[in-house]
């Protein structure tokens, strides 16, 4: 009479060993390193373009406090650019690294950059606060004279909120995906 106990069936089933070469993980590590390289370069380009735009606004703004806010924003952006280089810039493979170790290290580097994304944006806060505090009275004055100013600004605010929510969702998905990959590597 066959044993129909699910636990016994589960424990006695044949298992197949999955073999992956270390070269596969070296290739995956190199792909991740290359992706990080392009992300850092794209971030640099966006940061430098934003700093140039802030410089243009600086030249057009007569308000001294707003200018200080713009300088703080530009300094915060340059700080973020430096931090991204420190965190994500691909390091060369050490010759003693196995493919698995190199891939795990790159995943951990990517996970750390995603995990600390909000902390990395902290250098922008002083500039945003100073600039907003200096410009808020003129916006309130303009809105009291012409209420359509608020209606015209509403789509921007809605898009900003949608963007922030999407950013949070995408970041959580990336962290979950990276953690699943790291867990899979631990089981090897």
Image (spheres, helix red, strand yellow):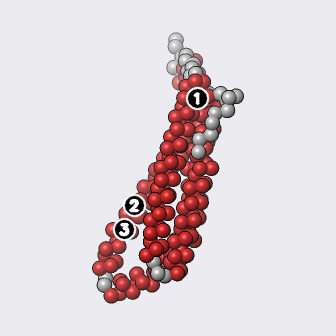
Q: Residue at x 51, y 20 (%)?
A: 4
Q: Quadrant of the C terminus?
A: top right
Q: Are marks 3 and 2 in contact (CB under 8 Å)?
A: no
Q: Residue at x 47, y 67 (%)?
A: 54
Q: Residue at x 29, y 79 (%)?
A: 148
Q: Residues within 10 Å of mark 1 (few under 14, many from 20)?
A: some
Of marks 2 and 1, which one's residue comes earlier in the chain? 1
Disc 2 vs disc 1: which is toward the camera?
A: 1
Camera-side residue of 44 and 132: 44
Query: What residue occupies the far top of the structure in this picture?
Result: 1
Q: Which type of secondary structure does the marked residue at label 3 adopt?
A: helix
Residue topped by disc 2: 162
Camera-side residue of 136 and 112: 136
Q: Are marks 2 and 1 in contact (CB under 8 Å)?
A: no
Residue topped by disc 1: 26
Which circle marks residue 172 in the picture? none
Name which quarter of the figure residue 103 lies in: top right
Of marks 3 and 2, which one's residue comes earlier in the chain? 3
The relative height of residue 176 versus residue 27 in the rendered view (above or below) is below
Residue topped by disc 3: 156
The relative height of residue 149 versus residue 117 in the rendered view (above or below) is below
Q: Position of residue 115 (x, y in %)?
A: 58, 51
Q: Which type of secondary structure does the marked residue at label 2 adopt?
A: helix
Q: Position of residue 137 (x, y in %)?
A: 45, 84
Name which quarter of the figure residue 90 lies in: top right
- Determine if residue 183 is in view: no
3D distance between C-alphas at marks 2 and 1: 38 Å
Camera-side residue of 172 and 13: 172
Q: Position of residue 171 (x, y in %)?
A: 50, 51
């Amino acid at each position: 009479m066959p044993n129909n106990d699910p636990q016994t069936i589960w424990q006695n089933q044949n298992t197949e060993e999955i073999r992956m070469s270390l070269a596969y993980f070296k290739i995956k590590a190199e792909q991740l390193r290359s992706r990080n390289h392009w992300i850092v370069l794209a971030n640099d380009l966006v940061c430098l373009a934003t700093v140039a735009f802030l410089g243009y606004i600086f030249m057009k703004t007569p308000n001294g406090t707003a200018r200080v806010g713009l300088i703080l924003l530009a300094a915060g952006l340059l700080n973020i650019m430096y931090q991204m280089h420190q965190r994500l810039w691909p390091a060369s493979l050490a010759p003693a690294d196995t493919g698995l170790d190199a891939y795990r290290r790159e995943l951990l580097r990517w996970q750390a950059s995603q995990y600390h994304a909000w902390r990395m944006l902290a250098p922008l806060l002083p500039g945003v606060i100073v600039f907003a505090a200096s410009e808020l009275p003129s916006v309130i004055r303009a809105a009291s004279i012409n209420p359509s100013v608020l209606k015209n600004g509403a789509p921007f605010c809605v898009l900003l909120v949608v963007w922030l929510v999407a950013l949070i969702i995408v970041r959580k998905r990336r962290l979950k995906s990276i953690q699943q990959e790291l867990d899979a590597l631990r089981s090897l």
